[in-house]
Amino acid sequence: MTRPAAIGVDVGSTTWKAVVLDASGDVLDRIVEIGNPRIEEQTTKNLAVLKERTGAATDIPVGATGYGRKRVAASRVLTEITCHAKGAFRVMRSAGILIDIGGQDSKIIHVEPDGRVRDFAMNDKCAAGTGRFLEVILGRLHVSFDDAPALAARSMRSVAVSSTCTVFAESEVISLVAQGESVEGIVAGLHASLASRIASLAGKFANGTSIWMSGGVALNSVMVDAISKAMGANVRVLPEPQFVGALGAALSVLP
């Protein structure tokens, strides 16, 4: 088995991810699970599992990124922008615009042809425009995150959700249900509403460059289609999108 050379940890607000790389940067192993508020405890447990499974040395370099990165005992602590750009470039080897919708923020990163970050934009001041927006409203509709894509795909008509604030949107959705609108249509409208905000945030970067998507929300095909429609361009989901940040963190500490 190829010898492990680096580990990357991405502690998001909803999930905990990590990858183990060999010296050439190829992924040997990975873990993703729901985030635990006891980040130190979860990280210690999962790093021990990864080291045992891969035979990694106890002093293998560890890079940490994400919302809880400062609570990881790592060789280097890195920003999410740096790690997502590095991870995406490792996969695509070209310039592009990366969209990452996280639980507490959304990031738009313009990656140069050499992998450097030219510019970026973030929505981190409000839940609107983040994965939290979907989580809150879907919860109000008693729809799970996993069931939402299939439900939205079945809708005959997308019901517009016009409120830009998550709190107000929650009230608006309750009113729409009371008015007899279908849950399927409302769920489709939620996706379109979030996609519209993402497209607006990414608008200044969309200049014909390839558009990619990473993060857990990228596994939602309806959301990917909605963003493609809102931006008027095809959005490509990166392979194993949940691990892009962890991959970038590991590459950053690779000897």
Image: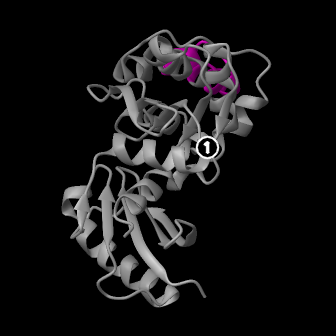
Closer to the camera in the image, 124 or 246? 246
Q: Is residue 40 left or right of residue 254?
A: left
Q: In this view, does 6 lie to the left or right of 175?
A: left
Q: Name the residue under label 1.
A: 92
- Is residue 46 positioned above or below 204 on the image? below
- Res 180 visible: no
**Magenta segment, prevailing SS (helix, strand or loop):** helix
Q: What residue span does the magenta drawing correspond to?
A: 173-190
Residue shown at 29% from the left, 49% from the top: 67
Colour logic: one colour
Figure quadrant of the N terminus: bottom right
Where in the figure is residue 106, as x and y percent of width and height?
40, 32
Query: What amino acid type should be assigned to the residue bearing mark 1?
Result: Met
* Quadrant in the rendering for residue 36: bottom left
* Quadrant in the rendering for residue 27: bottom right
- Is residue 109 positioned above or below 217 on the image? above
Where in the figure is residue 44, as x and y percent of width and height?
30, 78
Figure quadrant of the C terminus: bottom left
Magenta stretch encompasses residue 188: yes
Crowd band around label 1 with a 10 angstrom C-alpha radius: few (<14), some (14–19), many (20+): some
Closer to the camera in the image, 245 or 15? 245
Closer to the camera in the image, 220 or 59? 59
Magenta stretch encompasses residue 3: no
Q: In this view, does 152 lie to the left or right of 88?
A: right
* Quadrant in the rendering for residue 17: bottom left
- Res 120 visible: yes
Where in the figure is residue 146, as x and y percent of width and height?
62, 47
- Is residue 100 positioned above or below 163 on the image? below
